[in-house]
Amino acid sequence: MTAARVPAMDFFERQQQARTNTGRLLLLYGMAVAGIVAAVHVVLAVALTHGEGLFNPGLMLLSLGGTMLVILIGVAVGNSSLSAGGSAVAELCGGRPLERGTHDPAERRYLNVVEEMAIASGVPMPAVFVLEEEEGINAFAAGHTTDDYAVAVSRGCLDQLTRDELQGVVAHEFSHILTGDMRRNIQLTGWLYGIMGLALVGRVLAEIGGRSSHSRSREGGQSTAMFLLLGLGLLIIGWVGQIFSRAIQAAISRQREYLADASAVQFTRNPAGIAGALKKIGGYPTGSTIGNSHASAFSHMFFASALDSLFATHPPLEERIRLLDPQFNPEIAAATQSAPAEHAASAALAPVAALRQFSARPTAPKPLQLRHASRLLSELPAPLLQAVEEPLGASAIVFALLLDARQSVREAQLRALQEFAPEAVRFEVARLHPQVDALPSRLHLPLATLATAALGRMSLNQYRQFRQCVDGLIEADAMIDLFEFALKKSLCRHLDPRFLGKPSKAVAPDEGALVPQCALLLSALSHLGQTRSGDQAAAFAAGAAVMNLPEAQRVLRPIAECNLAHLDAALDALAAAPMQHKQRLMEACATAVSHDGLVHEDEMSLLRAMGDALEHPLPPGVQDE
């Protein structure tokens, strides 16, 4: 059966429609919370002042402050449910960690698909799990960010889906992570917990009032009535608020499912892949059912759901299929159970155009990135792929990547390893270094990306020792090159929060205050990518126009100011900027880099380091396509 060819613009329009609908629903959610605060104020005014203090500023402040305090306590409780990261959720749902050494062909195929997706997306390798006891066809991705995320699929997913179908499902889940859906779901769930807290407070007050009415039937009648009225009012507001909030949250989740479906097709250019997975869910005896008792709490994270109600977090299965395959007929759906035929990939974008488009918004990878990632994986020797699966080998890989080609520098680096690294690690470095040294440089960052997951399983003492070794290897020649800068920036951003704790979140600065940092990044890329001063100024001007820098700031900074220490400080300052600002900055940087129509390896290394620091991952080697 030939994969249906759907015009790409349909999917771009569908993504934009889903984003627009999400924005409207989030606004409605905010209005619902405001309505809850107003309703609490009315109840307080009636209970405490018989309605006379309805417009009393002090009572209004008390209503707002008290309601938000209860809700924010609930938000903190709700957010704590995922504080341990995606792996904790996967294990809670019965997931088994998947290691590269597995002999199961279906598991190896699944691991390969996830590796391709991670490399193509330019994000660290996630923790990979299999829900071994689940025969239904389902999957999920969980985690606050790409620092702590995990991907899990059911055994039914592995046994029943073809590679194209599995790739469509994994692309769908990566879309949720890369577009911030996990963070949004956690935030909305937290607010739902907070609204539930109002109902709990109301219940306690109502019980106090009820006991008072029995024990002091003739005394304190006014206070008893106040407690009862206030308690019942809050109880009703909490219940009604939960109903509306859950309905809006479910509607937002459904819109994000439409967006993830459309994104998966855009990335793979194979509607038959994800559509085939959905069709098999419809025709499979156990459907997408997950039997684990904890799964219901995370139902909004799954690829598909059996819920069919006002609070269903997924659109109807048939509707999702029809959007992907307009010719779908459920009466002959059994015919879709065979594997889809090979499909012709759409024409790849021109190199520079691809870089600019990819830099505009972080998304799951497109076909050219997936094909490139697949080629990169095939070029990596088996011993290196095996080594990155466990902490000792992964740390040895990183150290081998940092060893300098110059003999004098390497001797200083080996002395640093002798001082900080255990003997077993030094032995692995010596064993693996010849193969690492033989790799083309374009494979270095992808190999480090694969090592990140195993590095996250080190103990705290091992990680501190690992960081000492990394610093010693980099500082051995008293200078840092672009590859070392990109590698250390990525390792620190993704691993430091896991072991050393997350730094306190900085207040988002005003965009105007970040203009010097933006100009510095654009200047560095312009100097790096262009050899003639006129070309450097033109590249900077092109990037500054995209960034819409003020005229007074559209001045190319001297190359002496564009050292890596200044860039590091600028990236740290920009990390707290709004995501929309970061996206525009990355698009401006890509414009400056590609001004001459070429993107060199050093330029791509610096651009990737910037993207990683700004939570806007870029794939390796996209310019090679």
Image (cartoon, rainbow, N blue to C red):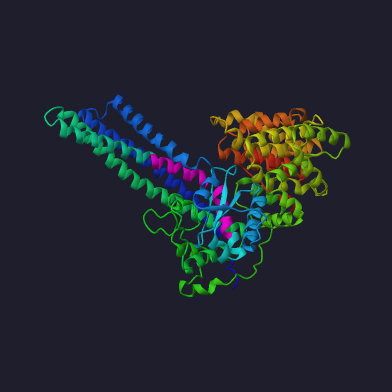
Location of the N terminus (image quadrant): bottom right
Residue 58 screen position, x and y as percent: 30, 24
Q: As displayed, is residue 150 above or below residue 536?
A: below
Q: Please identify the quadrant where the C terminus is shown.
A: bottom right
Look at the picture and state if 328 lies above or below 597: below
Outermost residue to the right:
407
Q: Is residue 624 magenta?
A: no
Please give the count of numbered marks on the rendered protein. 0
User: Residue at 70% across / 29% down in the picture?
Assistant: 566
Give residue 424's quadrant in the image.
Answer: top right
Task: Decide whether the magenta segment is chiefly helix, strand or loop.
Answer: helix
Specify the farthest residue to the left.
218
Between residues 87 and 535, which one lies in front from this camera angle? Answer: 87
Percent coordinates x, y for residue 537 in the rendering: 75, 36
Q: In this image, 34 relative to 396: left or right?
A: left
Q: Is residue 300 visible?
A: yes
Image coordinates of residue 49 in percent, x first then y, are: 21, 28
Task: Please identify the residue farthest to the top as the structure is shown.
Answer: 58
Q: Is residue 179 magenta?
A: yes
- Say whether residue 597 is visible: no
Identify the residue at image location x=64%, y=43%. 587
In the picture as drawn, the residue positioned furthest to the front comes out as 423
Viewed as shown, does residue 544 lie left or right of 425?
left
444 in relation to 537, above or below = below
320 or 516: which is nearer to us? 320
The residue drawn where x is 11% and y is 29% is 218
Residue 46 position within the rendered picture, expressed as x and y whole percent measured from the top left: 22, 32
Left-right relation of 15 to 455? left
Residue at the image point whose x is 73% and y is 39% from the top: 539
Q: Which residues are magenta?
A: 168-193
